[in-house]
């Protein structure tokens, strides 16, 4: 047989363990070219600019 816990884990102990499980909101910054919100240190998915220059050409 597999080992089983001797005692039930109390709700307080369970909740203290889960205190760090909450999700946090993503950190978004505004693109300097098109003012869309994007992730920091990434190419803007809307206009293709990064650090003030076009990295990915948008074929519209």
Image: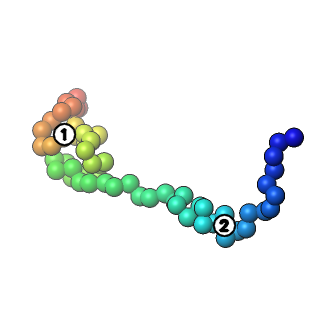
Residue with the mark numbered 1: 49
Q: Please tell me which residue is depicted at 78% across the width and 62% down the height of the picture.
A: 8
Residue with the mark numbered 2: 13
Q: CA distance from mark 1 to mark 2?
A: 48 Å
Q: Residue 56, located in which quarter of the rendered image?
A: top left
Cβ–Cβ under 8 Å for marks 1 and 2? no
Q: Secondary structure at mark 1?
A: strand
Q: Is residue 32 above or below residue 49?
A: below
Front residue of 27 and 31: 27
Residue 46 coordinates in the image, percent (x, y): 27, 42
Image position of 4 (left or right of 48): right
Residue 7 coordinates in the image, percent (x, y): 80, 62
Q: Residue farthest to the right? A: 1
Which badge, 1 or 2, is on the more N-terminal residue? 2
Q: Is residue 12 above or below residue 17?
A: below
Mark 1 Cα-neighbour bin, 10 Å: few <14, some 14–19, many ≥20: many
Residue 28 coordinates in the image, percent (x, y): 31, 54
Residue 4 coordinates in the image, percent (x, y): 81, 50
Quadrant for the C terminus, please: top left
Front residue of 58 and 21: 21
Q: Is residue 55 above or below residue 27?
A: above
Q: Residue farthest to the left? A: 52
Q: Please tell me which residue is depicted at 31% across the width and 48% down the height of the picture.
A: 39
Query: How many numbered badges does the structure rendering display?
Result: 2
Q: Please tell me which residue is depicted at 44% across the width and 58% down the height of the picture.
A: 24
Front residue of 32 and 11: 11
Q: Secondary structure at mark 2?
A: helix
Front residue of 58 and 43: 43
Q: Please tell me which residue is depicted at 15% across the width and 43% down the height of the picture.
A: 51
Q: Is residue 50 above or below residue 4?
A: above
């Amino acid at each position: 047989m597999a080992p089983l816990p001797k005692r039930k884990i109390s709700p307080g102990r369970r909740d203290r363990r889960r205190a760090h499980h909450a999700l946090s909101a993503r950190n978004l910054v505004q693109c300097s070219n098109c003012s869309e919100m994007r992730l920091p240190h990434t190419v803007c998915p809307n206009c293709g600019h990064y650090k003030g220059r076009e990295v990915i050409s948008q074929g519209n």
